[in-house]
Amino acid sequence: MPSNLDNFKNQPKSVVVDENDIVGLLAFKLELEKLFFSDVLIRNKALEGQPVQLLIEILCNFDFLEGVTHLNQGLWGKSFIKQTDTRACSNFGQRFGQLQTQNNFYIEIEECCIIFNDCNIVIHKIYDQSIPEQFDEILCNLAKHYNKLIKNMGELPYEIFIPVLEETNDTEASENNGDSLSQQRKAVRNNDYNKYWGLYFFSEDDALIYDLNQSSLISGNLYMLNL
C-alpha cells in the first residue's frame, strides 16, 4: 500500500534501536505486541547528540474495521470506552512511563504509526510527551468517528494523519516576533489531537481535512509545525 511520502521525505534516516541501548525496551516492545496483537518495530529518529526520538510502528495483520471492533470490545490495545464519559483507557501511556523511569536520559515518542492491512494511522508528536498523554483519547475517537471517515461509495482513507494543526494567533505572533521556541510550543499545545485530522484517499489528489467537532470532511491544506 502506498503511503504519503510527503510526510516523511524531510526526515533523517532512522535506525532500529538496539534493545541493549535502552533499559527495558524489549519488555516495552513485547508488551505493545501483546496489547495490539501485532508486530512492533521501534526506530530512533534522533541525530547524534540529540535526545532519543522514537518512531514506533505497530504492524497489525488485519483491517482497520476489525481493529475498531476489537477496540469497542475492550480487546485490542486493552482499551475500552467508558459508557459514562466516552473516554478510552489503555496501558500504552503507563507502559511508556515505566520505560522512561528505567533510564536516566530523556525519551520522546516522535511518531507512532498503526499500520492495518487497508489503512495507516500516523500520530505525530505536537508537544513533549503528547503521544503517550493523549493516545487513549485518539483511540476513543478512532472508534467513535470510524463511519464518518469513510467517503461516499464506501472508500476508506489509506492514511489518516493525526493531527492537522490550526495556526493560532499566538503561534503567528511568536514566529513573526522571533520569540523563543518554548513560546511557540506553548501555542502549539493549545491545539490537540481531537480537532482536525488529515485523510488521504486514492480518489483524491490532495488530502481532505476531517473536522472531529462537526463530524464532517472539509477541503483544506495540511499545516505542520516543525518544532
Image (cartoon, rainbow, N blue to C red):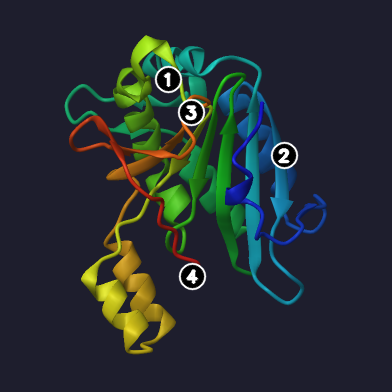
Mark 3 vs 2, N-terminal side = 2
**Left or right of residue 137, residue 19 in this image:** right
- Residue kind at label 1, given as amino acid type: Leu
Q: Is residue 100 above or below residue 184?
A: above
- Residue kind at label 3, given as amino acid type: Phe
Foreground of the two, 202 or 227 = 202
Q: Position of residue 168 (x, y in %)?
A: 25, 66
Q: Position of residue 125 (x, y in %)?
A: 48, 55
In the rendered image, which residue does mark 4 sit on? 227
Alpha carbon separation for disc pair 4 and 3: 28 Å
Q: Position of residue 57 (x, y in %)?
A: 65, 38
Q: Quadrant of the N terminus?
A: top right
In the rendered image, which residue does mark 3 sit on? 201
- Helix, strand or loop for disc 3: loop
* Contact? badges 3 and 2 (CB < 8 Å): no
- Residue kind at label 4, given as amino acid type: Leu
* Contact? badges 1 and 3 (CB < 8 Å): no
- Residue kind at label 2, given as amino acid type: Leu
- Helix, strand or loop for disc 1: helix
Alpha carbon separation for disc pair 2 and 4: 24 Å
In the rendered image, which residue does mark 2 sit on? 41
In the rendered image, which residue does mark 1 sit on? 71
